[in-house]
Image (tube, coloured by chain):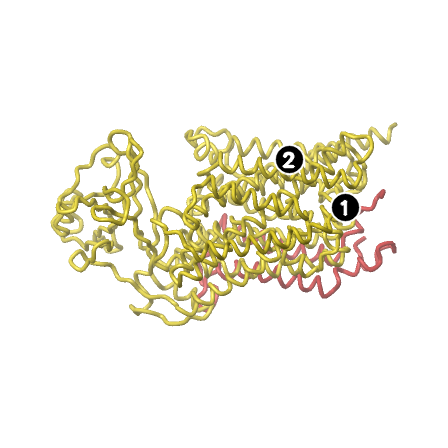
Chain colours: A yellow, B red
Amino acid sequence: MIYDLSPLALVVFAVFVAVTLGLSFWLGRRTTSSAGYFAAHGQIPWAVNGVAFAGDYLSAASFLGICGMIAFYGYDGFLYSIGYLAGWVVALFVVAEPMRRLGKYTFADALNARFNSRGVKLAAGVSTLAVSLFYLIPQMVGAGVLVQPLLGLPHWAGVVLVGVIVILIVVTAGMVSTTWVQFLKGALLIVFSAVLTAIVLSRGFAAEPPVAPGRAQPGELRTVGPLAGSAAAPAAASQQLSDLVDEPLVPADAGWAEIDFLRTRDPATGRISVWARRSGPDGAVHYDEGQLLTRTADGRVLVAGLPRGRGEGEAALQPVGSVSRLPDGAEETGPLGPIEFFRTVSDSEVRVWRSQVVAEPGGGQSTVYYPRPTAGSEVLRPGEHPRFAGIRTGDWLDKLDFVSLMLALFGGTASLPHILIRYYTVKDEAAARKSTIVGIACIGFFYLLTLYIGLGAMTSGAMDPTDSNMAAPLLARSIGESLFAVVSAIAFTTVLGTVSGLILACAGAVTHDLVDSFRREPLSEEAQVLVGKGASVVVGVAAVVLGVLFKGLNVSYLVGWAFSVAASANLPALVMLLFWPRTTRSGVVASVLVGMASSLAWILLSADTYAKVYGLPAADAPTPFSQPGLVTIPLSFAVLVVVSLLTGKKRAEE
Amino acid sequence: MENNASPRNISRLGLRLFAVYAVCYTAFVLTSAFAAPVMEREAFAGLNVAIVSGFGLIVLALVLALVYGVRGGGKRHDTPHAPSAGGAR
């Protein structure tokens, strides 16, 4: 799709950034001590901290990634909503209050409260950096992905823009300004998600029946069929298609010979149409018109065989996503209640869009985007996304992969350093608990809305078939340009809030865990703030560089990595420290290091990484399934127990 | 600082609520993974098990959090130095 620069989005975003930075500089005048810079003096009111939890946690992956996944695959995206929220139960009931009581600035503080050991600090500090950097990369990549369509800037400019703004926020007032940015962003995100949901429910659904070739307006996507003598051989069917649309077939060369798509060319305009074959339940054959995006060997981009653009002799991809049939053949539903909404989807038929890559002769590559009319009841069940399709097959390893992911989401939240440091910004354990409850309420409410927003986007007719991350902003565009501007600006600020928290977590780890463990005397208060600010700049610049380098990598995929590493490295040590009095210093260090190393190694050797990062065949990967949690979390627990028993005994003997 | 982080510092109420949620979440994950067709069945009011259980888990988290909040986190925080009034032992 071709995006225009939205001046309103630019204005809304500029206002938000100006308010944020103004607040940061104003608050920054009062931040001179370490407790102020890293923990806001523990003076943040619990209700504000609770909303800031939501602002910290609901990253681009939540808002853009989950809504996009639901818009393209239905219920599967909602599995992430469920898993991400479940993690907060661990945070509230197990981690929140002890964290507040035991620590001061960093996650390592709490872990080290009993031991006062350099090794524990160092291990926890390194694991904080590793997890936070993994989390940072997708946020920065997400920023770049967003600015391209929204502000009309290239990818790197978006990454640099976010980097500069965030570094300013973090360097001026540290945790104080970060908290208020997250509060503002969390509140806006939840309010506007509720607005979007209300509009989706009040406008209901409208059916868009298939467009027959004779009735099509220019640019409309057609459906041909049912073809006569539907059991006929493919050759006869393709000739029938060609006759019905009155366009000659394009010969199937290179990759086209191996797949089930047909192409026809309009002799007058040279426009190529691509057709996906579909057999109905009664065996009747239909052809649905898809969309064709080609990258030629010399780097040109063609749409439907024509140069991309809106002018004469050019073509652009059409927005997609619609309801093809409503219950009882209705044309529209009118306003729907929250339960009626799902019932209606379940009894309808929806056109979801899939894609397939085809090799072109001479080294180019085409992507075919094609509609697949799907029963609504299939959209509302798990297992449609390729990542989760395994739960519908008989393969046990695929099922374990799914369990492993859900385990990492459950255990990961309570082990994310940038979430944990938010427990030090409130005055006591009661406030930590209350703010977690507010956080759960905000985050849970938002996740409930994701299913309405995602399904609303799926049927809005406004989806970009090439980019699922744009689903939520494009849903807003189908309602109105001003809502699009506001939602886009909020999506962008979503990145700001989360990135500030991550950079501060890294800076805290560098200042309090790493630098301190190499010094005999602790740093002075002023020096701590100075080191923290310096570390923020360095981490911020590193995040920008990584964001540019990792352009094109799937955003939600990387967030999954961060959860797995956090759950494997941090959770066992944290939990055992609270529940098992015989836990020793060496046990904690070994558990953190083994958890981190094993989960990282597993990820780097997984089929997912082989296919998506290295471009190697997935079957060559040595790990049996892609998600490490199911193996590495128990491994890390086991290492802690064994090492603690060994070292505990040794100490007793001495 | 020594033994500050002993098990009695965790509230018994919190652990009970956590156990309730963990059982429900585990049931949801295992059903999705090993009995996926169950998720497609109608639960009630025309909604399938996947929707009802997914929404149910999110609402359950909210409810448990509120119970915990109303009960003051098992009251442990009020007596940080006393031997665990109402805390787990």
Is A307 rendered above or below residue A646? Answer: below
Secondary-structure class at tag 1: loop
Q: Depth check: B70 or A19 in front?
A: A19
Viewer-proximal residue, A153 or A513?
A: A153
Please name the residue shown 54% across and 38% down the image.
A544
**Residue that mark 2 sits on:** A595
Alpha-carbon neighbours of circle 2 within 10 Å: few (<14), some, or many (≥20)? many
Mark 1 vs mark 2: in front: 1
Q: Position of residue A201 (x, y in %)?
A: 43, 67
Q: Measuring 55% from the left and 60% from the top, which residue is drawn there? A: A188
Disc 1 to disc 2, C-alpha distance:
34 Å
Q: Residue at x 58, y 60 (%)?
A: A187
Reading the image, the residue beneath label 1 is: A33
Identify residue type, mark 1.
Answer: Ser
- Residue type at the position of mark 2: Gly
Nearer-N-terminus badge (1/2): 1
| Residue A293 on image: x %, y % | 29, 42
